Amino acid sequence: MADTKMILRVAEILIEELKLEDVTPQTFDPEIDLIDEMGIDSMDLTTVVLVLQDEYGISIDEDDYPKLKTVRLIAEYIEQKLNEK
Amino acid sequence: MTAMNVKHAPIPASEQSAAGSKMKFSQIIADPVVRERWEKVRRWFFLRESTYDMTNRCNIRCDGCYYYEGEKQFTKENGRPGDWRALMESEKQRGITYVVLAGAEPSLVPELCQTCYDVIPLGSIASNGFKRLPERVGYKIHISVWGNDDTSRRIRNAKDLLAKQIDNYRSDPRAVWVYTFTRENIDEIYAVMEALAGNGCRATFNMFSAPVGYAGPLRHDAGSLARTREVMLDILAKYPEHVLYSPYNAVAHTHRLGLHDLYACSYPRMNPSTDIGLGRSFRQYRTDLTWDRGVACCVPDTDCPDCRHYAAGSAVVTARLYRHGSDPEAFRAWLDYVDTYLAVWVMGYEKGKNLLDRPTPPPGFGL
């Protein structure tokens, strides 16, 4: 399970990079499907991935994008990558 | 028109990365020029395209035409505006924000083009330019040019086509002439471009990409690819105000490898994934308003390994942001490519100066 701090930071990056309005890291539902429910597409997701890679010093493979469907899944993915380092 | 290629400032040493090394994206976009261009293009990341064959009819018949290959040409035509309106409404509902109206000749059904425009106002129309589309259809209009008038007469059976196109679309902000380089017409661009620029018309470049099974004289070979690149760069330098292109476009579309080998085509025909991106949202509708995922791409019936088509590249190269996002030169090249694509495809979008004035290899490949 990803910790709350990580989830909030991922939400914050999504809000900032995708210029989302009417939502804060605290109100961002970590279970919402970013693709199906929020309409985020590959270019948006790539932008977020590039920022996450910088922030956490990890490498996110293009083939893994489909795994990054929710804020919680992204946070868990990052934690797994950090643990592998 | 502001498109120009200028000598750009050298990439600062602090931003240069050794070949193959990685650099932080945040460092790359810290450069104010790069950041400005990044912010300019990313506003358009909401575009989600699909393409639509509008009619089975055309007023000319060209050798190597994509439309008259395969089964789609035999599809029953649906000319009912109400059905098209319903289709556009449902497309909008599923998130499509950009339409490409093509096959065979959309200007023959202007009322259907208008119907599409009324519902989804961003898009483009591929036309031979023989018949002018009404101004109220506010899409970009891509006017196909396949060489000089002699060549047009020979392979398109069309007399004085360029003059007719210019008469129809001179000073029309919708119009972009798309010069398709074949193996046979490479140097004809000089006369064509002189005529276009002399009339204030803007052009971009396409590469003939052979339909499946085509082995005729238009298909490119190694020599014609190299010569085309050379000529593209020369024309770009000669007509910076009238050519919407960049050195990276020239590399991506004249490489010995096609777009799929260089960038992994993301259209459904070559991409089985339906998770995200074009593989999820793109559809290619036939004239009977049906679609088939198995053949869905922007130029159906093209031989995929030979595909260097400008429309395919606009989506396929753009989608590979990730691969360009860790090297400052590659990222500048990508920005030039996307800036070009948006200027060609989006009404009102003006191309900026190219950030790079030299060819850059695709990530992971040589020139």
Image (cartoon, grey):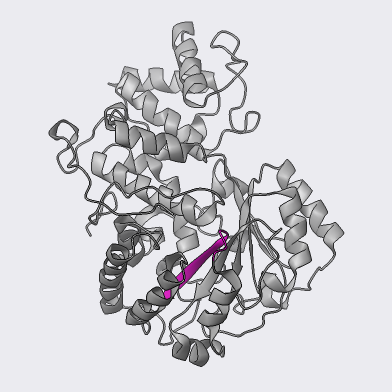
Considering the image in quadrants, where does the N terminus of chain B appear?
A: bottom left
Considering the image in quadrants, where does the C terminus of chain B appear?
A: bottom left
Q: Observer-nearest residue: B346 or B263? A: B346
Image coordinates of residue A5 in percent, x first then y, are 45, 7
First to last magenta residue range: B171-182
| Left or right for B31, reference B77 | left
| Left or right for B94, reference B232 | right
- Residue at x-position 32% and y-position 62%: B250
Q: Is residue B285 visible?
A: yes
> What is the count of numbered marks?
0
Q: Please, is residue A27 above or below residue B315 in the view?
A: above
Image coordinates of residue B104 in percent, x first then y, are 65, 74
Q: Is residue B166 magenta?
A: no
Image coordinates of residue B328 in percent, x first then y, are 25, 39
- Residue at x-position 54% and y-position 70%: B143
Q: Observer-nearest residue: B81 or B213? A: B81
Q: Quadrant of residue B198?
A: bottom left
| Left or right for B104, reference B258 | right
| Left or right for A12, reference B74 | left
Image coordinates of residue B133 in percent, x first then y, are 68, 68
Q: Please, is residue B1 above or below residue B196 in the view?
A: above
Q: Is residue A61 visible?
A: no
- Residue at x-position 68% and y-position 77%: B73
- Residue at x-position 27% and y-position 28%: B27
Q: Quadrant of residue B23?
A: top left
